[in-house]
Amino acid sequence: MHPDRVLAIGEFSRLTHLSVRTLRRYHDAGLLEPATVDDATGYRYYAADQIPTAQVIHRLRELDVPLPDVQRILRSPDPGARAALVADHLRRLEQELDRTRAAVTSLRRLLRPEPAPLAVELRAVPETTVAAVEDDVAHDEVLAWYAGAMAELDAVVGDGTGVPGGLYDNALFEQGCGHLLVYRPADAPPRRGRVHPVTLPAVELAVTTHVGEHGDIDVTYGELGAWVVANALAVAGPVRETYLVGPRDTADPLAWRTEIGWPVFRVAAR
Amino acid sequence: MHPDRVLAIGEFSRLTHLSVRTLRRYHDAGLLEPATVDDATGYRYYAADQIPTAQVIHRLRELDVPLPDVQRILRSPDPGARAALVADHLRRLEQELDRTRAAVTSLRRLLRPEPAPLAVELRAVPETTVAAVEDDVAHDEVLAWYAGAMAELDAVVGDGTGVPGGLYDNALFEQGCGHLLVYRPADAPPRRGRVHPVTLPAVELAVTTHVGEHGDIDVTYGELGAWVVANALAVAGPVRETYLVGPRDTADPLAWRTEIGWPVFRVAAR
DNA sequence: GTGCACCCTCCCCCCGGGGGAGACACCAAG
DNA sequence: CTTGGTGTCTCCCCCGGGGGGAGGGTGCAC
């Protein structure tokens, strides 16, 4: 046995199915340091027991784990912590899969030859005081934030106090992060944890209703937007959503009803 | 109604949930040309009926469709052709999902605390003449090529003529594409279509058997590689796989047996 | 006519790789 | 010991699909 036979980078590449270039990059990134490096020539030499490590990196990269996260996983000595980090990533992949499914649903609706006509109503909404949770949130954390905020809201004000809703800052879509607010109507909104009273300003809303799950809600947004423009209106302020019928009311997605209201004002005709 | 009210890029951004920067990029790429561009100022103005197009692009991008492909889809006027292109992409996503699943399987095995010891055998293989299909193939097309080549081979020489196998060029993993060859033993190999006789050279093989589906076969490769190195051998020439028990023999992946043989030669001890 | 939000172009950065140039290093054969 | 082929080094540029920010011109409402 020659357990410490050293391997040049090319040989190591053949054994691990990682390209030479990639191995060099991993060295530079501090991900996979060669067992020894010749000071004079710069030649990298690997040991046979680095093969499993290289393979773990390979697999993690196939799962699109970013290099810094790969490093974190490799550096964590405890197998439990390691497994937790990996599980974290698998969860992220799962979320991405949900996003993909939603995009497919939405695309199907967009490419349908005959879109159903949209019923839009112009509605003046008076000032309202509600129990709310609000925060600045990044685009890809919206779903998680929403779940947490709505759960806290339910816990504080109960879930029999009228139809819940949310306000979504336009900057969320334009800059990738923006101000979010979810609320429930309440006569005397309490102040507990993140829940506190907020007075929503009076607005003129262009309102339509989205039917079904939220995978293709952007299509409804677009149709509403087209209607708004066609009627010589312009958008002003955050979008309002009202969850008339949602997952908490019935398990059947086809029965879900979400009201979308876009604050508008009249613009001069051209 | 003002159906031709023009929209500045910011307003269009709010209506489509695409960032201003991204809209500009799509203009530059010829993906989504503004309805009019002011020659003097360079200001982009969009029409309301461009909203659906923008949304289709948004969805396709969420599915990671490359911009040139998005363009191709948008330009194809026939809804049927368009649906076919989209379906093509969904197939690609499905393949990627398979790859992800394989990586998860493999990772689980890699992170298992106690790896099972590997039984490796050194075997001298004589020169053999076989019926083969061979080609230079890119890494991400291997599975598709394999399926086609093996089907053609079965059709020409029948599937009762001994255990099939394959040779996989190391360059496939190092450079991303390399020479592939699949074969079946045959006394008088015919020459029909892509099938033709090939004489495989005699080699010394380090052989082990991979059990189960191929998702984690790279782990076995790595273990075999480590064994080869530990025994003062070096790899030479393409890897040989032999499909002792495969999907064509039984539907139970746990029963599959794949022999992996790495051509080796003895190196001087250090 | 003035202020301010909007819009323009341009350049650099991110990630994780690949291509290729030009210069050394290794090793076996002659 | 030289020579040649192959392996390896570093360095820079490229890809795709975006984001950040600088510096300067515009549209429009007051």
Image (cartoon, coloured by chain):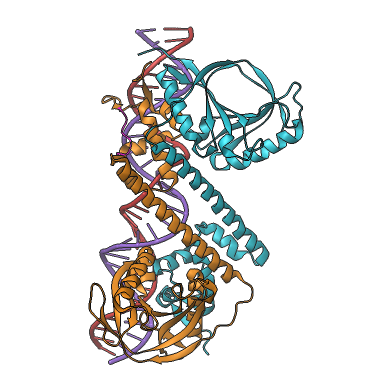
Chain colours: A orange, B cyan, C red, D purple
Residue nearest the viewer, comparing B178 with A82: A82
Q: Quarter-wise, where is residue A93 in the image?
A: bottom left
Dominant SS type (magenta): loop
Q: Nearer the viewer, residue B55 or A59?
A: A59
Residue at 58 percent of width and 34 percent of height: B256
Picture quadrant where residue B167 is located: top right
Q: Is residue A149 above or below residue A52?
A: below
The picture quadrant where one finds residue A125 is bottom left
Q: Is residue A236 magenta?
A: no
Looking at the image, is A83 positioned above or below residue B24?
above
Measured as percent of width and height from the top left, residue B269 is found at 38, 12
- Numbered range of the magenta stretch: A29-35
**Residue at (50%, 78%) from the top-left corner?**
A210
Nearest the viewer among B19 and B211 is B211
The residue drawn where x is 49% and y is 68% is: A215
Q: Between B258 and A125, which is closer to the camera in this rendering?
A: B258
Residue B183: give x, y in percent of width and height. 66, 29
